[in-house]
Amino acid sequence: MKPIRNFLALEERLAGWRFWLLWVLATNAGFFPGLRIGNLLAARLDAGSGELSIEILRAVIIGTSFASLIGLFQGLVIARHGERSRPQ
C-alpha cells in the first residue's frame, strides 16, 4: 500500500507522466464498465423493430452511460490538482 501512496503523493506534486498514467487508467475505468452498463440498458429496448428512432435512443443511452463514468473518474483525477476550496 505504501508504494501506491508514494506514487500518488509524487503525482500530486510533480504530475508529468504520473498524471498521464492516472488519466489513461481513469478513462479506461470509466469507458469499459460504462459501455457494458449502456449495452445492458439499451438491450431492454425493442432492438428487432429496426426503427431509426429506437437505434438513435440506444446510441444515446450507451454514449451517456460511458461518457458519464469517464467524466466521473477523470474528474477525480483532475480534482487532485485544482484549488482547494474551504466552506465559509
Image (spheres, rainbow, N blue to C red):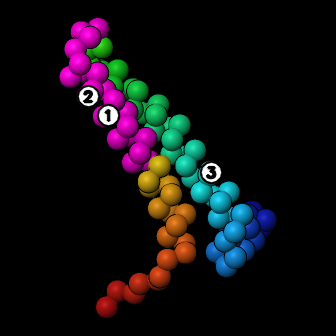
| Mark 3 → mark 2, Cα distance in angstroms | 29 Å
Say what secondary structure mark 1 lies in. Answer: helix
Say what secondary structure mark 3 lies in. Answer: helix
Q: Residue at x 68, y 57 (%)?
A: 21
Residue 5 shows up from this direction: no
Name the magenta segment's main secondary structure: helix
Please identify the quadrant where the C terminus is shown: bottom left
Which residue position holds label 1?
A: 61
Q: Position of residue 49 (x, y in %)?
A: 24, 9
Q: Residues within 10 Å of mark 1 (few under 14, many from 20)?
A: some
Q: In the image, is residue 69 above or below residue 77?
A: above
Q: Which mark is residue 25?
A: 3
Farthest right residue?
Answer: 3
Q: Position of residue 2 (x, y in %)?
A: 77, 67
Q: Residue at x 39, y 26 (%)?
A: 40
**Which region shows up in magenta?**
48-69
Is 76 placed left or right of 10 in the picture? left
| Mark 1 → mark 2, Cα distance in angstroms | 6 Å
